[in-house]
Image (cartoon, grey):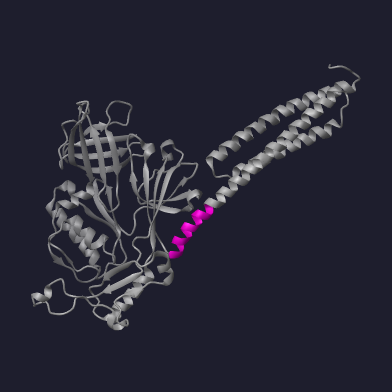
């Protein structure tokens, strides 16, 4: 399914297979593939002396490609970065390698200082950064400007620093800029490598991750550690001027809100937030704010807009596309519906990280992105999990009682059959058709009741018990129908005037 090849350099078009998709001995070991959206993706693997790649890999020069042959998709493309040689207790040598994807090529160039004016300065910087990069690197490391889908790029950045490489420049000035953001994506068409810059990569997929279908393990993490309930707003630095060497000392005080806030330098969040999390103090700095009244305004807005927690999910799930059950494989950036009633999760979540084991694809681990929560959502998440767990316990207990009752009813029905056969054997048949029909109707009712109960139980263990009971009931019904036929034949034989055991 997975093919891994290394290439001596950019001119090597044939390459060397170090992991074959076929059932043979050409395999890597201890592998871990972690693609990423804005950060640089990595691939780690280990080889032994019998691998065709042994002795051929050179750091920063050897190129590597990982292909999913089932979907004809390139999952990873980049270069070998760091080797480690190891001799184990069995005196067998091995070499382990860390690889980085093609975004790492952007580290190989240094930007020149430049100032930007006019419209869409963010886009100007992006184009200039790639232009400078392409002027400094080999052809196989170049990027063409791809799709740019960023709506607000005017007057957001003013210059490029001349001490940073291209990757850090794009990351610091654009991607990590709170006023800009976005995500980058490498796209290849007709042998040309493009770097797209869009608001968000990926799309909504039909694949579903669901309990009792493909969900193996799930961890849910609520992180409220960034909450601020006591804010100290800070503005520009005070005193002195730029020509005064002492005034450039970074220890100079900053503008506060004390003059417009009854002498207090801080703002408190809503009491409900304080009751939930206590006092959590933090300072926030706005260098461009020069008036205390404006600083007070932006500080209040910060407290109003903040989200109290993030919810993160780590999931181990079976990729059912491997066996053609699901139409698509899991991939970062895409959004999938996740359903796990035991953890109160029933929503669309975006996949932001994935760890693929080439030798163990069933061990794929999925990281779903942080979901920001308001205070109400945070509180509801905690209480709903507790409430759902209590409800589940009550449901299982109630259904267990129902099953016991059904088992008792089944015993009563079985006894009626025994009594009926005894009466027939004694030659005093009752209204046999009415009795037989009553018994069959009762059995059918029991089967239906068991099915209804089984459909409402989310516990795998309870479901297995109910399914087993249901199978026993159906087998009992089949056997009983055979017995009823024999009973009817016996009654007809008696009615003909025969006596004895016939």
Identify the residue shown where x is 14% and y is 54%.
Answer: 109
Assess whether residue 187 is covered by the magenta stretch.
Answer: no
> Main SS of the magenta segment?
helix
The picture places residue 239, in percent across and down from the top left corner, at 16, 80
Task: Please identify the quarter of the rendering in which residue 80 is found.
Answer: top left
- Residue 419 vs residue 215, the one in the foreground: 419
Task: Please identify the quarter of the rendering in which residue 417 is found.
Answer: top right
Residue 330 in the figure: left or right of residue 159: right
- Residue 174 vs residue 355, the one in the foreground: 355
Split into 4 quadrants, where in the image is the N terminus? top left
Q: Is 167 drawn above or below residue 83 in the view shown?
A: below
Identify the residue shown where x is 18% and y is 78%.
Answer: 238
**Residue 162 in view of the camera:** yes
Identify the residue shown where x is 24% and y is 32%.
Answer: 18
Residue 174 in the figure: left or right of residue 474: left
Residue 417 in the figure: left or right of residue 258: right
**Residue 14 in view of the camera:** no
Assess whether residue 384 is covered by the magenta stretch.
Answer: yes
| Residue segment shown in magenta | 375-388
The picture places residue 155, in percent across and down from the top left corner, at 24, 71
Identify the residue shown where x is 28% and y is 73%.
Answer: 233
Split into 4 quadrants, where in the image is the C terminus? top right
- Residue 238 vs residue 365, the one in the foreground: 238
The picture places residue 474, in percent across and down from the top left corner, at 66, 32
Q: Is 279 drawn above or below residue 136 in the view shown?
A: below
Q: How many numbered marks have been drawn onto this rendered protein structure?
A: 0
């Amino acid at each position: 399914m997975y093919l891994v090849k290394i290439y001596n350099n950019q001119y090597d078009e044939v390459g060397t297979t170090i992991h074959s998709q076929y059932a043979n001995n050409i395999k890597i070991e201890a592998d871990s593939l972690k693609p990423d959206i804005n950060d640089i993706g990595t691939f780690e693997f280990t080889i032994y002396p019998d691998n065709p790649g042994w002795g051929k890999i050179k750091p920063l020069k050897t190129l590597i490609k990982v292909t999913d042959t089932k979907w004809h998709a390139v999952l990873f493309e980049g270069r070998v970065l760091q080797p480690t040689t190891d001799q184990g207790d069995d005196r067998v040598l091995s070499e382990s390698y860390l690889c980085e994807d093609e975004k790492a090529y952007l580290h190989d160039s240094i930007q020149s200082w430049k100032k930007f004016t006019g419209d869409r300065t963010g886009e100007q910087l992006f184009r200039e950064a790639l232009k400078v990069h392409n002027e400094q690197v080999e052809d196989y490391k170049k990027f063409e400007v791809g799709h740019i889908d960023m709506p607000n790029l005017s007057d957001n950045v003013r210059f490029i620093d001349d001490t940073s490489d291209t990757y850090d420049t794009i990351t610091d000035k654009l991607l990590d800029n709170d006023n800009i953001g976005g995500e980058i994506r490498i796209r290849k068409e007709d042998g040309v490598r493009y770097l797209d810059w869009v608001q968000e990569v990926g799309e909504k997929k039909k694949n579903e991750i669901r309990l009792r279908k493909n969900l193996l393990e799930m961890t849910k993490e609520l992180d409220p550690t960034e909450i601020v309930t006591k804010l100290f707003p800070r503005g520009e630095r005070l005193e002195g001027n730029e020509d005064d060497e002492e005034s450039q000392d970074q220890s100079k005080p900053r503008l506060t809100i004390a003059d417009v806030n009854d002498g207090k330098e801080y703002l408190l969040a809503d009491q409900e937030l304080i009751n939930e999390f206590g006092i959590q103090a933090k300072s926030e700095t706005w260098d461009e704010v020069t008036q205390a009244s404006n600083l007070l305004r932006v500080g209040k807005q910060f407290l109003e807009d903040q989200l109290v927690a993030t919810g993160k999910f780590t999931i181990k799930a079976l990729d059912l596309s491997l066996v053609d059950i699901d139409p698509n494989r899991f991939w970062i950036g895409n959004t999938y519906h996740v359903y796990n009633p035991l953890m109160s999760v029933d929503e669309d979540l975006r996949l932001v990280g994935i760890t693929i084991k080439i030798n163990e694809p069933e061990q794929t681990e999925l990281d779903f992105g942080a979901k920001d929560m308001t205070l109400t959502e945070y509180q509801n998440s905690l209480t709903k999990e507790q409430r759902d767990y209590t409800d589940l316990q009550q449901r299982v207990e109630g259904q267990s009682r129902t099953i016991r009752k059904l088992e008792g009813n089944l015993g009563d029905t079985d006894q009626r059959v025994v009594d009926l056969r005894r009466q027939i054997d004694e030659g005093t048949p009752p209204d046999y058709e009415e009795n037989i029909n009553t018994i069959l109707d009762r059995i059918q009712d029991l089967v239906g009741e068991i099915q209804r109960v089984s459909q409402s139980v989310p516990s795998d263990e309870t479901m297995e018990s109910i399914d087993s009971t249901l199978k026993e009931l159906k087998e009992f019904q089949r056997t009983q129908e055979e017995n009823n036929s024999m009973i009817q034949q016996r009654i007809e034989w008696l009615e003909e005037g025969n006596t004895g055991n016939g």
